[in-house]
């Protein structure tokens, strides 16, 4: 079941999200070095999300040209779409829960400083919320299975391996800091990072299961709504029917 069948609205939304996302990525990259930005989970998940929006926009345009403005909206595999949405929402939750209290600065001044501040809110707020809205509005719901939560752990595990290997083999990111986030900084936390990683893995899995649960709830609500709309009302008996009994 799908919430919105307006293909024109979906196309405009996806084009806007693509452009906004590209703006956020570009200004954050201008504010820092591309190699530095590529290490961050935030930037990687924003790249995944923008690529998804671009693919969806192209598919929506082709579909609308062939099949009209109203109907089921073009998409990708529901597990892939939900997974990328899940990853970018982790960016949103992680930033606002763990990092937003820090004063944001990339060491720039003037116009670049203003642009990177705006870009910071784009990549940590605007794009995650737009991705969530796209998933809720335009994706068929009720197709996810509980094992999707395990599949979605593959990227976070690979990312964890990446940042620990890069810390040992690569140059510091800035100053003497080798890790992109303080809660996985072995130099800062020592062996307690193992507990942090375990807690993050459990949180990722739990949030993945919550995503599957939400998908099923949305599907159930849509099924109930469409069932109520399509149900023929019960008509009162007529006088002729009464006389014939």
Image: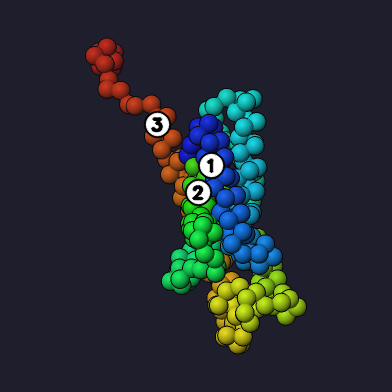
| 19 w.r.t. 204: above or below | above
Q: Quadrant of the C terminus?
A: top left
Q: Position of residue 56 (x, y in %)?
A: 62, 41
Residue 16 bears which disc, if any? 1
Q: Are marks 1 and 2 in contact (CB under 8 Å)?
A: yes
Expressed as whole percent of the image width and height from the top left, the position of residue 103 reads 45, 71
In which quarter of the view is residue 100 placed? bottom left
Q: In the picture shown, does residue 225 fall above or below 113?
A: above
183 vs 237, left or right, is right
Q: Residue at x 54, y 27 (%)?
A: 69
Alpha-carbon span between mark 1 and mark 2: 10 Å
* Residue 229, numbered circle: 3
* Residue that carries the numbered disc 2 in the rendered image: 130
Q: Is residue 84 above or below residue 207?
A: above
Q: Secondary structure at mark 1?
A: helix
In the displayed image of the protein, which residue is found farthest to the right?
Answer: 169
């Amino acid at each position: 079941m799908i919430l919105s069948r307006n293909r024109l609205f979906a196309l405009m939304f996806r084009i806007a999200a693509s452009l906004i996302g590209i703006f956020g990525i570009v200004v954050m990259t201008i504010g820092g070095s591309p190699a530095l930005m590529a290490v961050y989970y935030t930037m990687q998940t924003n790249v995944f999300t923008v690529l998804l929006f671009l693919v969806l926009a192209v598919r929506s345009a082709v579909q609308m040209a062939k099949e009209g403005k109203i109907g089921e909206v073009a998409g990708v595999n529901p597990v892939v779409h939900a997974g990328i949405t899940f990853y970018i929402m982790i960016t949103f939750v992680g930033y606002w829960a763990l990092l937003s209290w820090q004063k944001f600065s990339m060491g720039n001044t003037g116009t670049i400083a203003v642009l990177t501040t705006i870009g910071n809110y784009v990549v940590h707020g605007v794009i995650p919320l737009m991705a969530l809205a796209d998933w809720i509005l335009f994706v068929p719901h009720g197709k996810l299975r509980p094992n999707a939560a395990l599949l979605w752990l593959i990227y976070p595990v690979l990312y964890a391996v990446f940042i620990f290997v890069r810390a040992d083999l690569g140059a510091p990111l800035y100053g003497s800091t080798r890790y992109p986030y303080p809660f996985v900084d072995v130099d800062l936390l020592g062996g307690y990072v193992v507990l942090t990683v375990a807690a993050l893995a459990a949180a990722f899995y739990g949030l993945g299961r919550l995503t599957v649960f939400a998908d099923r709830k949305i599907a159930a609500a849509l099924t109930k709504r469409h069932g109520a709309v399509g149900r023929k009302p019960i008509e009162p008996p007529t006088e002729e029917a009464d006389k014939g009994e």
